[in-house]
Amino acid sequence: MKEISLGQGLDTIIFGLSRPEVLELLGEPTEVEPMDGDDESGAMEAWHYDNHHLSLSFEEDCNWRLTSITTASPEVLFEGIDLIGLSQGEVMEQMEVFNLGDFELEDLSTEVVPNQSLASNSDFSLNLFFDHDVLTEIQWGPYWDDETEMPLWPE
C-alpha cells in the first residue's frame, strides 16, 4: 500500500523531483502527454503510468519539476483509508474528520460525460474527482506560497 502525503507526495515520489529523477524511480511512463501553456502558465507535461494508476505532472514554469500527482488506485491510501470507490458523502465526511476545512464543489458534467463533479481545497492543493457520486481520482500537489505564486517544495 502507498500513502498520500499532502504537500509532500506519494512515498518516494516527492514533489519537486526532476523528470530524470522520476525516470530513475518509476522507469519510462506508459504515455507522455504534452500540454500547451496559456497567458497565465507555461507548458505542462503529464506522465501516465497505467500499471500504477498514476499520472504525474511537470510544469515548465517550475523548471519541469513534479507539481502534481493523480491516482485512481484503490491501493493508495489517504490517512490510512482507501477512499477510491466511496460515495461523495462518505469522502466528504472523512475530510471533516481529517479537519481539512472547506471544499469548493464544482459540477463538471457535460452532455457527453454526465454526473461529474470536483471537490477542491486550495489550502491543501487537493482535488477529489467524482463520477456518479463515487470518488474515482485523487489529485494533490505541493503547498503554494500565495505571495510568490510558487510551490513550497518538500525538504
Image (tube, rainbow, N blue to C red):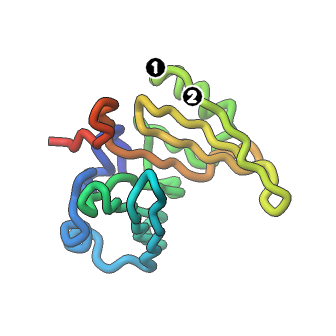
Q: Position of residue 21 (x, y in %)?
A: 19, 67
Q: Nearer the viewer, residue 35 or 96?
A: 35
* Residue located 68% across and 30% down the image: 89
Q: Is residue 8 left or right of residue 89?
A: left
In the current view of this chain or complex, which residue is farthest to the left? 155
Q: Is residue 51 visible?
A: no
* Residue 60 sits above or below residue 119 on the image: below
Q: Which residue is the site of mark 1? A: 99
Q: Which residue is the site of mark 2? A: 103
In the current view of this chain or complex, which residue is farthest to the right? 111
* SS state under label 1: loop
Q: Nearer the viewer, residue 20 or 44?
A: 44
* SS state under label 2: loop
For the C terminus, the image quarter is: top left
Q: Residues within 10 Å of mark 2 (few under 14, many from 20)?
A: some
Question: Which residue type carries mark 2?
Answer: Phe
Separation of marks 2 and 1 at Cα, in angstroms: 11 Å
Residue 119 found in image quarter = top right
* Residue located 61% across and 47% down the image: 129
Q: Nearer the viewer, residue 76 or 19?
A: 19
Q: Is residue 34 left or right of residue 116?
A: left
Residue 134 found in image quarter = top right
Q: Nearer the viewer, residue 45 or 26?
A: 45
* Residue located 21% across and 63% down the image: 18
Judge depth for marks 2 and 1 and give the one in front: 2
Q: Residues within 10 Å of mark 1 (few under 14, many from 20)?
A: few
Label number found at residue 62: none
Q: Position of residue 67 (x, y in %)?
A: 34, 53
Q: Position of residue 103 (x, y in %)?
A: 57, 28
In the current view of this chain or complex, which residue is farthest to the front? 39
Question: Which residue type carries mark 1?
Answer: Asn
* Residue 68 sits above or below residue 57 on the image: above
